[in-house]
Amino acid sequence: MTAEAVRAAGLFKAFGTTRALDGLELTVRADEVHGFLGPNGAGKTTTMRILLGLVRADAGTARLLGGDCWQDATALHRQLAYVPGDVVLWPNLSGGEVIDLLGRLRGGLNQRRRAELVERFDLDPRKKGRAYSRGNRQKVALVAALASDVELLLLDEPTAGLDPLMEDVFRQVIREDQCRDGRTVLLSSHILAEVEALCDRVTIIRDGRTVETGTLDELRHLTRTSIQAELAGPPTGLAALLGVHNLRAEDGRVRFDVDASGLDAALRQLTEVGVRSLVSRPPTLEELFLRHYQQTEVANGGRAELSR
Amino acid sequence: MTKLTGTGGLVRLVLRRDRLLMPVWIGFLCLVLISFPSSLREVFPTAAERRQYADSPGFVALYGRLSGSSLGEFVAWRAGFLPVIVGLIGLLTVIRHTRVEEETGRRELLGATAIGRHAGLIAALAAALGANLVLAALVTLSMTGQDLPVAGSVAFGLELAAAGAVFAAVGAVAAQLTSSATGARGIATTVLGAAYLLPVAGDLSDHADGSLAWLSWLSPIGWVHRIQPYGRDRWSILALAAALTAVLMAAAIALSARRDLGAGLLPPRPGPATATPYLRTPLALAWRLHRGLLAGWTAGFAVLGVVFGSLAEGIGDLQRDNPTLRDIFARMGGPTGLIDAYLAGIMGILGLIAAAYSIQATLRLQLEETSGRAEPILATAVSRLRWAGSHLTFTLLGPTVALATAGLTTGLTYGLSTAHPGRQLPRLLGAATVQLPAVWVLAATAVALFGLLPRLAPATWGALAACLLVFMVGAAMHLSHWLLDLSPFTHIPKAPGAAVSATPLVWLTATAAALTAAGLNGLRHRDIPST
């Protein structure tokens, strides 16, 4: 097996005058769970479709498991399973029939695993396609994908319609799979807790471009820590420090956010004044993503303030 | 009246959504009817000719009994199938704006606003009834414009509207019964089919000994036939139809009050928990998706074959006495033998209808793509060509089965009436299947557009309409030769009767193959879904 399960480099794609992808880069290592994040319309689904060989990139290379996504599409599809973001089923086929059909078209289904997943996702496989709710349609596609013996899973917002209980089941299943046979997962998602719980590495894209990629820890270093402190005197000099944002002071208390690079200087400044109490909070994923999602910010070189 | 809050707004929504559909079907029916009086007067100038024409059992089955022999009565009789068509439109309209809305979830979006419980149902019915009244008014105007009596024209317009109203209400009841629009359409069209067949049996019996004539009175279609516009103008039957409509509407409202949004009164049948071993290829899936369509069209073609076949003998008698009619059939079906000319014309019509089926089946492929159902299939180890091929199998073979069935039933019924079934059966089976290359050219046009210019694929319907026009009026309007040659059906030999030469059939088949290949090649290289 190759060390890189997915490699997309310099992908461009335009639909008419809209530019969907603008030099996108994405690398997924073998056996990792890779989070794929970005605001609506950033190009996540287009990227997935290029990886599946359904859409052809205008420029750039896209390779999966050592093969070319467009040329070798059909052969590659034996080794992967895909869950689309919006699952549409045939109105007159039951969920069970769809699971079996998709599994067989892919090259085989693990029957024991299928039964187990139907049970765990609490899915009624006898219902007809038209009778399922959105979440249940999603479960049908998930069971079909997860019960297949494949190397790579491409999941496009797979839990968008699931209730929290089922979301939890999904996380457990992915984690167990990972422990057992270590398959590669590319997971596009908006649910940050899910990404945090599952993903080894993440890629954040915006406007068809990759803006950040790395492990979650690496990404955290790029962002700010929130500080709350009770001080002995007025917080002089703090506002002038590089990397301090959103400074608010009242009644001897200060709150501010500080870039990782400015943390040291800021704390020195605080102890100079005299610290009575201090709460420091690491950046939440939410803040991390909001920073990347918000359009104006990056345009200003990452120095614009988050609105609170 | 809070249960009706917002009805006005919903009626406007229905009219907005159908702003093209309604004028088109109303206008189309009026145009068809406007052509009736003058052409029928020309072809059947005397009362005796009209009576003779209407007296054959085949026509009794198709249009009912002719009440009197004035031109107006003859026109209304000849339009005897229109109430069924208007009824079909009525029930489809109501289901489209009630059950389909619920199934797609749009009704829920609206239901959450300040809208009464029954507003959606009433609005759909009101729009359907309104459209039928407009139809009645326009038919009345069209017919009086053709110098037919005013009272009869009003009765004629209302005859059609009454059928539309009753079956709109039938559609409203059916929409309450099942949770799927397909199921509701199935129930309502079955009722319509029964309503059509009961008077067929009743009228045929009336034509013979009369012992079962009462059957006609069990059906709203039988009722409206008995209004007898331009003859007795029985207005009381309109009251009967109005009463039935009111009862059915009340029933639909009562049923709707007793169920939840999205649910039907009949429980949905569950499917199997696992797939049969056969459901493992794209072709098996295509069979599941196409079999209903195939069965429906084949049954329809079988019925058409029986009707047309049983008319053949009578047509022969008629044409011997009527030179105008002879001209018409000679134009459509070629110069050899009167009955053969009629049958060849019929086969041409069946070929055009089969083309409609094959276009519909081909566009299923596009529906699969645009709905997002193609994506999960193409993300498995199924190539684009194999996926497309699975559907195209039904596009090409479906019309073959349908046409062969029609050929068989035509040959059988006509053959039995001449006591030479052994001779007629193979002739008509051949005449029906000889249409196939032209059918395939139209299907292949749809494939080519789907692969190369997917947005234009529905324009294939326009191509079919053009072929229909060329077939019906081309020769009569003295269109230039190359224009006629554009329709693949122009090149099909006029069988039975004329000698069948293989050359045009080979050419048409080759054209179809080339168009299909171009379309599939386009499909291989374009994005899915297309943009």
Image (cartoon, coloured by chain):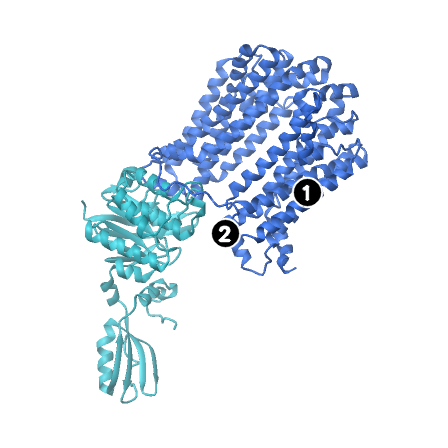
Chain colours: A cyan, B blue
Q: Nearer the viewer, residue A224 or A200?
A: A200
Residue highlighted by disc 1: B244
| Of labels 2 and 1, the one closer to you | 1
Residue at 39% in and 51% down: A136
Residue A97 found in image quarter: top left
Question: Which amino acid type is marked by label 2?
Answer: Gly
In the rendered structure, the answer to whether residue B59 lies left or right of residue A172 reads right
* Residue B164 x/y as whole percent: 66, 40
Residue highlighted by disc 2: B105
How many residues crowd around disc 2 within 10 Å: few (fewer than 14), some, or many (20 or more)? some
Q: Is residue B80 visible?
A: no
Residue B212 found in image quarter: top right
Task: Tell which subunit mark 1 falls on.
Answer: B
* Residue B187 x/y as whole percent: 55, 39
Q: Is residue B232 visible?
A: yes
Establish if B487 lies above or below A215: above
Residue at 81% in and 33% down: B149
Establish if B501 lies above or below B209: above
Residue at 64% in and 19% down: B311
Residue B421 found in image quarter: top right
